[in-house]
Image (cartoon, helix red, strand yellow):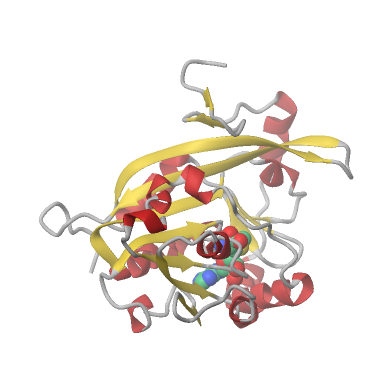
Amino acid sequence: MDPETVKDGSGQIICNRTRELSLEEQSRLLSDTNCVSEFKQNKLELEAQKNWDLFYKRNTTKFFKDRHWTKREFEELASSSTDTGKTLVLFEVGCGVGNFIFPLLEDGSNLFVFACDFSQRAVDFVKSHSSFDSNHCTVFQADITKDDSTATVPMETVDIATMIFVLSAIHPDKMIKSIINVAKALKPGGHILIRDYGLYDHAMLRFSKGHKLSDCFYVRQDGTRAYYFSLEQLRSVMEQAGLQTVNTTYIQRSTVNIKEGIDVPRIFVQGKFLKPFPTQSTSGLS
Ligand SMILES: C[S@@+](CC[C@H](N)C(=O)[O-])C[C@H]1O[C@@H](n2cnc3c(N)ncnc32)[C@H](O)[C@@H]1O
């Protein structure tokens, strides 16, 4: 393990360098030069909402696991515990069926949560969850690439916005606009917390030919799309949207896939970004 690499208490490896590829992996990536046709790419963009809705029709609430690691990874969420007496306002963008918000709400955190998702079906699953309480949560359908977030979330009222495996689902040309939209709801001094797929993640290397949309951007069998971020790319999107980088890191984990009998190297990116006060920098934010 090199000096820039740290293993945390949960066994994850935290580092600032991209994973090194084997020669076989390098040549496989380099040989995948043909991108999906422009016609098909436009169709995927037009049908993005339908494809996520069908995803939840097929998988219901069974696909993603509850995310119990969030307070460990993001210290500002831990400060939402009841003992501080302070109610944090959270905006969870692309909430899916609530795997991020319900573990936080269930352990008594002092939170008010705004949550939105592209898929009406996912929003309905959140509303019908046994722990859903409209006194602590407002959930609504929205396309964060174009629907004004402040139509539902009052402007500059949010302490923390979270995007967990969501930015990667958005077309790269629309990422900056989406972040500007999220940041409108954020208080100056508030943060956006991001966890997403990282460059050379196992899933990226597994795409067969015919799934590449552009550099680091792929379409899955079901029509949903995934971008695989380098730390530089993530920082570039956030900073062009007017946010300041507080920290970013790669997270490497091994996931044992018992069915396939393999140890799968997962790579994620994680970052914390600050909405500056107007005097500090206002570029990109409106
Ligand atoms: C990989 S899932 C992650 C769900 C959830 N954040 C979690 O961690 O379990 C990506 C989610 O982003 C949502 N999404 C994709 N594009 C979106 C958009 N333009 N606006 C709002 N949500 C979007 C999808 O509907 C889906 O629920």
* Residue drawn at 59 percent across, 30 percent down: 19
Image position of 25 with respect to 197: above or below: above
Q: Is residue 270 left or right of residue 22?
A: left
Q: Nearer the viewer, residue 113 or 220?
A: 113
Which quadrant would the N terminus be assigned to in this image? top right
* Residue drawn at 34 percent across, 65 percent down: 87
Q: Nearer the viewer, residue 30 or 264?
A: 264
* Residue 271: quadrant of the picture: top left
Q: Is residue 80 left or right of residue 129?
A: left
Residue 65 at x, y percent in the picture:
68, 57
Q: Is residue 57 left or right of residue 151?
A: right
> Taking the image as drawn, is residue 84 in sight?
yes
Q: Is residue 211 left or right of residue 92?
A: right
Image position of 85 with respect to 268: above or below: below
Residue 18 at x, y percent in the picture:
54, 31
Image position of 33 with respect to 160: above or below: above
Give the image quadrant in which the ligand numbered 1 is located. Answer: bottom right
* Residue farthest toward the front in the current orientation of the protein: 83
* Residue farthest toward the top in the current orientation of the protein: 2
* Residue farthest toward the left in the current orientation of the protein: 279
Residue 54 at x, y percent in the picture:
72, 76
Residue 92 at x, y percent in the picture:
47, 66
Q: Nearer the viewer, residue 223 or 30?
A: 223
Image position of 113 with respect to 192: above or below: below
Q: How many marks?
A: 0
Which quadrant would the C terminus be assigned to in this image? bottom left
Q: Nearer the viewer, residue 83 or 224?
A: 83
* Residue drawn at 66 percent across, 65 percent down: 224
> Taking the image as drawn, is residue 169 in sight?
no
* Residue 265: quadrant of the picture: top right
